[in-house]
Image (cartoon, coloured by chain):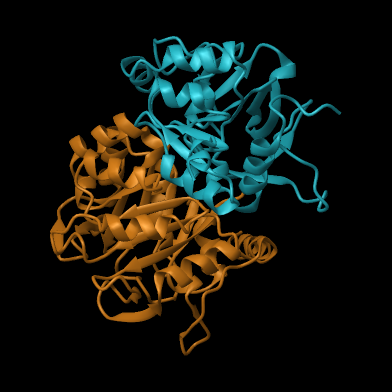
Chain colours: A orange, B cyan
Amino acid sequence: MRKRLIPVLLLDRARRLVKTERFGARTYIGDPFNVVRLFNEKEVDEIAILDIDAGPEGRRPDFGFMKELASECFMPLSYGGGIRSVADCEELNRLGVEKFVLGQAGLEPKVVSSVSEVFGSQAVVVCIDVVGGGDSAHCVTGSGRQRHRIHPLAHALDAQAAGAGEIILQSVDRDGMRSGMDLEVIHGVSRALEIPVVALGGAGEVSHLADGLWAGASAVASGSTFSFIGRLRAVLVTYPSRREVDDAMVRSEAATS
Amino acid sequence: MQALSEVQPEVSVVDYGVGNIGALLNMFDHLGIEAVAVSDERGILAASRLVLPGIGAFDRAMRTLMDRGLIGSLNEAVIARGTPVLGVCLGMQLLARRSAEGQLAGLGWIAADVLRIEVPPSSALKVPHIGWSDVRPAGVQSLFIPTDTADEPERFYFDHSYHMICEEASDIAATFEYGRTLCCAVQRGHIAGVQFHPEKSHRFGMRLLEAWARSQGGVTQP
């Protein structure tokens, strides 16, 4: 099976797509509908739409807007941001979202297990935002504002035990840096889990994604890689061909062995 | 105008609260195939074609169908009247007799059982199986139509932890590889099911749903 490459679309409070750096400074990317249509044409493996202002502002998901957006998505679609209950997931599912990304709620085993019981584990994605590395690595929520004294690996194992079917492992430090993914954290977490790990954060080109896959991730996600081109970060929606990915995988293997 | 409103839609998607109804309706709408959600006996019996979606746990889906009193009308429509049906994801597993995931009996329309996917301990393969896999059509079926790009394999998006094992090899409509060869589509006459998500599989899924919606009920004769 080919491993998945997942464009991540960050939605702000004004329903625009943006790209962040270290969860801070934002660059405007474009209109969500245009970008989704472009990704349809490029036949992407999957997309993840994350409303990054919903949680911190205490909002629930923007259901009306997601209904319109989901009707344009003919690819697998996961949504995160402001989900707090099974009821939120039921409403999202009704309008065409089949995977639910839990951030803050992912720290509550009861929410994870109740969503998993209703929709099956394959529908439950727990997003773990990581700051730091090695033994001192810890998790944050609320767009990085809230620190938790739990190690990402411990959090991932708890989420798996509670019924998560997939983990998005996101490096806050590398967000938007385009210098490569945190391979050590990816390796450490993915080899300890039975469920797939989706690595996110730090990639700026296809070779970075290939490195993340070699480190053990079952899939790699990125905003920058699929939104920018060149050193000057010109906005351009792109997606590599299968051939380009295969070539990058071969080069990455040669470099690591 | 009145006559128009009485024309049956081409496809009726069974809405029993367990399934990605929105995504399926979106896809049919995109294909120009009139599709509606039906949630009661009247809707199911009036349907010219049924899609049975489903996600989540096997028992929960069967219990919901029971609680809503839909099992009788599904049997009446599909078995007695021969209404073509397509089960999608868990909806395909419900066509089987039973599942290792639960205790309740399935619809039993296909002589098959559902088991958890097992991968070798040494393998890097994960369960659930989430992602795109190449799919190999098998036997006589009308879900996969040959295309000009014959060298390009059929490719679909999967998201599941269980798979179906058919008693009759002739019921297998397609297989895929995940550690070993597994069944991912079944067809027995007008009863069909796919383990993957055609509504989330770009042009591959569009082609399949269109082929199914336009096929004459049962198997296309070779």
In the depicted view, which residue is nearer to us: A53 or B21? B21
Quarter the C terminus of chain B occupies: top right
* Relative height, residue A50 to residue A168 (above, below): below
Disc tally is: 0
The residue shown at (54%, 15%) is B96
Q: Where is residue A178 in the image (x, y as percent from the top left)?
A: 44, 76
Image side of residue A203 versus residue A247, left or right:
left
The residue shown at (40%, 69%) is A32
Q: Where is residue A215 in the image (x, y as percent from the top left)?
A: 49, 55
The residue shown at (44%, 52%) is A77
The residue shown at (36%, 81%) is A28
Q: Position of residue B22 (x, y in %)?
A: 42, 45
Q: Where is residue B159 in the image (x, y as percent from the top left)?
A: 49, 39
State whether residue A125 appears in this view: no
Image side of residue A56 versus residue B165, left or right:
left
* Relative height, residue B198 to residue B92 (above, below): below
Place residue A137 in its image quadrant: bottom left
* Relative height, residue A145 to residue A214 (above, below): below
In the depicted view, which residue is nearer to us: A244 or B94? B94
Image side of residue A134 versus residue B86, left or right:
left
Give the residue furthest to the right: B222
Give the residue furthest to the bottom: A232
